[in-house]
Image (cartoon, rainbow, N blue to C red):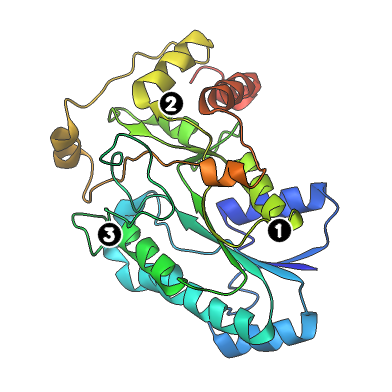
Amino acid sequence: MIALLGASGYVGSKFVEVLSSRGLKSCGLSRTELDYADASELRDWMRVKRPRFLINAAGYTGKPNVDACEGHKAECLMGNAVLPGRIREVCEELGVPWGHVSSGCTFSGRRPDGGGWLEADSPNFSFRSQPCSFYSGTKALGEEVLEGAIDCYVWRLRIPFNHEHTHRNYLSKVLNYDRLLEAENSVSHLDEFVGACLDCFAKGVDYGVYNMTNPGAITTRQVTDWMLEEGLTEKNFDFFEDEEAFMRDAASTPRSNCVLDSSKLQSGGIFLRPVEEAVRSSLRELKLSSSTVGV
């Protein structure tokens, strides 16, 4: 049995779906069912259930976006930095391998050599490398807490998207925002991300940190151009003049815009589609959804 923490969340619910489609027995938990932030409660539950693997998809992202984390710092710190450490404590004590859903939003831009950030690089968008959002700072701390963890995967998710029209889908956000910030980013197709996470354990890939993004990078204008090309919308997209205008008019905390290198994952025999292919495919599927007609 595979234990899944945070099963009711955006990422966790996709794990539930994919685990079921693969015929894998799992037990999904939310904080209303078990206070897994309490190490003793989690330990007792795991001793009874004896999972062969645990997935932590729980965390604090803020709603509707990371700006909300600035007003809920205690919850954000607990969910993103303290909780991973407590899960590590229990899993290592009981000898249970596990995977933690982290974030690539602890970086900004590209490496000095022009390439994408590697797993071995130190975050440059964190409390130790300001400026950063409080959310990104806590996610970086969460990875520090897991440094040297035994039998542990750290899976970095980045700007999730797919074909489902929800408020958490990056493509839906682009369609619905009144104004957009032009930026270059690595992104993760949510379904492929979840499948790749499960493949790490199934294929016995070496434990450690992995950038779980679709190879390549995209800009906001590329996405809006593809939306128009695919006939998803006829909207006249409006952009902020620059990041300063975005911060002045639409945001209360800096955003991470960065490119990650996913070659380590590929070297382990796990492949996600190139980013343009994955995004365009999702846009075509979004178009078929009646909920997006006329957007």
Q: Is residue 96 left or right of residue 240?
A: right
Q: Which of the two discs, 3 and 1, labels the residue nearer the N terminus? A: 3
Q: Is residue 43 left or right of residue 20?
A: left
Q: Residue at x 56, y 77 (%)?
A: 87
User: Can residue 5 be seen from the camera position used here?
Assistant: no
Q: Could you say which is closer to the camera, residue 152 or residue 66? A: 152
Camera-near label (3 vs 2) is: 3
Q: Is residue 183 left or right of residue 292?
A: left
Instruction: Report the residue marked by disc 2.
Output: 175
Instruction: Report the residue marked by disc 1.
Output: 201
Which residue sits furthest right? 23
Disc 1 residue type (three-letter): Phe
Q: Secondary structure at mark 1?
A: helix
Disc 3 residue type (three-letter): Ser
Q: CA distance from mark 3 to mark 2?
A: 29 Å
Q: Is residue 99 left or right of residue 108?
A: right
Q: Which of the two discs, 1 and 2, labels the residue nearer the N terminus? A: 2
Instruction: Report the residue marked by disc 3.
Output: 126
Q: Measured from the top left, where is residue 278 in percent x and y? A: 58, 27
Q: Which of the two discs, 3 and 2, labels the residue nearer the N terminus? A: 3
Q: Residue at x 78, y 79 (%)?
A: 50
Q: CA distance from mark 3 to mark 1?
A: 29 Å
Image vertical order of residue 275 relative to residue 209, above or below: above
Camera-near label (3 vs 1) is: 1
Disc 2 residue type (three-letter): Leu
